[in-house]
Image: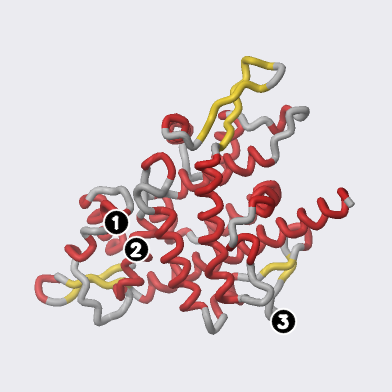
């Protein structure tokens, strides 16, 4: 961390603030890496269960991994059941019980999730992520830490970047403590909530920006975005709907002959940069929590 770039957070853990991240001279470079790395893990054929990504499904996957890591057979409160998953995801406000039911069923069908009996209680089914889901989770975590590594290369985020298994487990065990802070960050960005909730909307708009769509001289047409539909597992009509909602909310304007050209407004840039900075700040927090957990574990086993 650079000097002066930390505040007190969960459990007195120091981490970077959104304001410090936004003010960093390399933020533009970090934003580009944020978009490119997240696009990889949200692409069709990569995102689990052959669905498009949205906040509800992404949150569900993260919580499945966290609850599995915190499972204690002797403590019923930690058993990773479907009901516990629904209860926890409900705190975030992005997924209905019906969505979770269908998503979990699809995860099981596509070998990202297993249902196992709780030892000693055959009536209880537990949700266990398979190595296929855990491998995706490591890529997803690495996508969060690649842009932070641009901003703060010393000491950097090496365990997350190299997909370290012990770090993954420590991160999952520790992230629960940051849930309230993550929820507060997401809902503090009210202007973009609709894009978080809509399948692949956020990554499509971010990709449009990195294509040059945030410049006032943009010559991007709607037809230039056709390739984004199959890439992120949505229909062409869904992409058009995303653009229409963005235009309604003053995130996108049209210009040129017959309003053929589209570009994202400064209002969009401000709103989404604020969200990206908030997301990176929470990633930094959970990273510090994971390192603290690993240090405590090392002391206890010494």
| C-alpha separation, residue under disc 3 versus residue under disc 1 | 41 Å
Q: Which percent across, then down, holds residue 70?
A: 70, 40
> Which residue is pictured at 54% across the width and 37% down the height?
130
Q: Which percent across, then down, holds residue 112?
A: 49, 37
Q: Which percent across, then down, holds residue 87?
A: 59, 35
Q: Classify residue 118 by image quadrant.
A: top right
| C-alpha separation, residue under disc 2 versus residue under disc 1 | 8 Å
> Element at badge 3?
loop
Which comes sooner in the sequence, label 3 or label 1? 3
> Element at badge 1?
helix
Please rate how many residues cluster around mark 1, counting C-alpha atoms within 10 Å: few if below 14, some from 14 to 19, many from 20.
many
Is 91 situated left or right of 216 in this image? Answer: right
Q: Which mark is residue 115?
A: none
Q: Classify residue 286 by image quadrant.
A: bottom right
Is 153 situated left or right of 209 in this image? Answer: right
Is 147 situated left or right of 99 in this image? Answer: right
Please give the count of numbered marks on the rendered protein.
3
Q: Which residue is mark 1?
A: 242
Which circle, 2 or 1, is nearer the viewer? 2
Q: Which percent across, then down, holds residue 185?
A: 57, 59
* Labels 2 & 1 near each other (Cβ < 8 A): yes
Q: Which residue is mark 3?
A: 3
Looking at the picture, tell me which residue is in the foreground, 267 or 74.
74
> Which residue is pictured at 69% across the width and 47% down the height?
173
> Which residue is pictured at 37% across the width and 53% down the height?
43
Q: Which residue is mark 2?
A: 205
* Labels 3 & 1 near each other (Cβ < 8 A): no
């Amino acid at each position: 961390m650079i000097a002066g770039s930390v505040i007190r957070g969960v459990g007195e853990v120091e981490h970077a603030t959104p304001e410090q991240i936004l003010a960093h001279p390399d933020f533009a470079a970090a934003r580009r890496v944020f978009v490119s790395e997240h696009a990889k893990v949200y692409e069709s054929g990569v995102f689990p269960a052959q669905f498009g990504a949205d906040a509800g499904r992404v949150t569900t996957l993260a919580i499945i991994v966290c609850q599995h890591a915190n499972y204690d057979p002797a403590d019923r409160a930690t058993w990773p059941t479907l009901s516990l998953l629904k209860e926890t995801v409900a705190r975030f406000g992005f997924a209905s019980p019906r969505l979770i039911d269908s998503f979990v069923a699809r995860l099981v069908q596509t070998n990202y999730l297993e249902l196992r009996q709780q030892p000693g209680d055959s009536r209880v089914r537990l949700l266990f992520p398979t190595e296929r889901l855990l491998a995706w989770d490591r890529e997803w975590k690495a996508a969060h830490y690649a842009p932070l590594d641009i901003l703060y290369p010393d000491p950097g985020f090496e365990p997350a970047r190299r997909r370290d298994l012990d770090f993954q487990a420590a991160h999952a065990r520790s992230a629960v403590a940051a849930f309230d802070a993550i929820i507060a960050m997401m809902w503090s960005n009210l202007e973009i909530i609709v894009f978080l909730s809509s399948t692949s909307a956020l990554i499509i708009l971010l990709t449009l920006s990195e294509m040059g769509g945030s410049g006032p001289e943009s010559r991007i047409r709607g037809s230039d975005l056709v390739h984004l539909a199959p890439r992120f597992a949505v229909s062409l009509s869904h992409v058009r709907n995303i653009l229409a909602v963005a235009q309604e909310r003053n995130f996108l304007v049209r210009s040129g002959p017959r309003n053929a050209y589209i570009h994202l407004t400064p209002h969009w840039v401000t709103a989404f940069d604020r969200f990206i900075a908030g997301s990176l700040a929470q990633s930094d927090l959970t990273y510090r929590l994971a390192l603290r957990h690993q240090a405590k574990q090392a002391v206890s086993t010494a």
